[in-house]
Image (tube, rainbow, N blue to C red):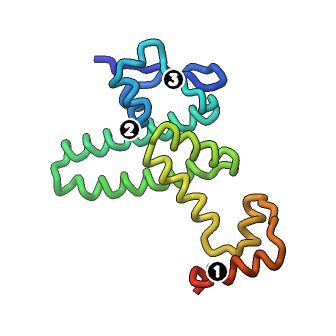
Amino acid sequence: MAAKKITLKSSDGEEFVVEELVAMESQTIRHMIEDDCAENGIPLPNVTSKILSKVIEYCKKHVDAVAASSAAAAAEGAAAAGASTKSADDELKKWDEDFVKVDQATLFDLILAANYLNIKGLLDLTCQTVADMIKGKTPEEIRKTFNIKNDFTPEEEEEVRRENQWAFE
């Protein structure tokens, strides 16, 4: 039996035909499907085709990984499946790390899309990537990384540092 297909329409008019299971990684799309709003395709006005194709790639990889791990568990029995599941998890983790090696604009667009589409795994992954970019950096380094202009006067900056001293201890 062929898997049911869903058409997703990006903000720039491109259509993507994906398996329903892949589309349902998004809670937003899942609710539209459950409410019978997917007959003529699902418009996604907040997501460009460039970002939607990346989101679909992520969802497909994760759906396939879960399916492969379930199949391995069924075929090998519970004891042997533990080892293969661990290596599959490591492989998926590595894939995720490579997936978010993109330019900042794409990363931020992925965060917005993951939030809009309510894809928790992708939102967690992309936000963690930004958190890792900030971790251990001084405010000046963070400003440089994200191209943020410092609009504090030296006095204001000193006051903020004093008020938040506890965070630097």
169, above or below 145, in the image: below
**Label 1 neighbour load within 10 Å: few <14, some 14-19, many 20+:** few
Report the front residue among 97 and 45: 45
**Label 3 neighbour load within 10 Å: few <14, some 14-19, many 20+:** many
- Is 121 left or right of 86, judged from the image as shown? right
Report the front residue among 157 and 9: 157
87, above or below 25, in the image: below
Q: Disc 3 designates what residue?
A: 8
Residue type at the position of mark 2: Asp
Separation (CA) of disc 1 from disc 3: 48 Å
Separation (CA) of disc 1 from disc 2: 49 Å
Q: Disc 2 designates what residue?
A: 64
| Residue 20 horizontal/vertical position (percent) | 38, 25
The numbered mark, 3 or 2, whose residue comes first in the sequence reads 3
Q: Disc 1 designates what residue?
A: 163
The numbered mark, 1 or 3, whose residue comes first in the sequence reads 3
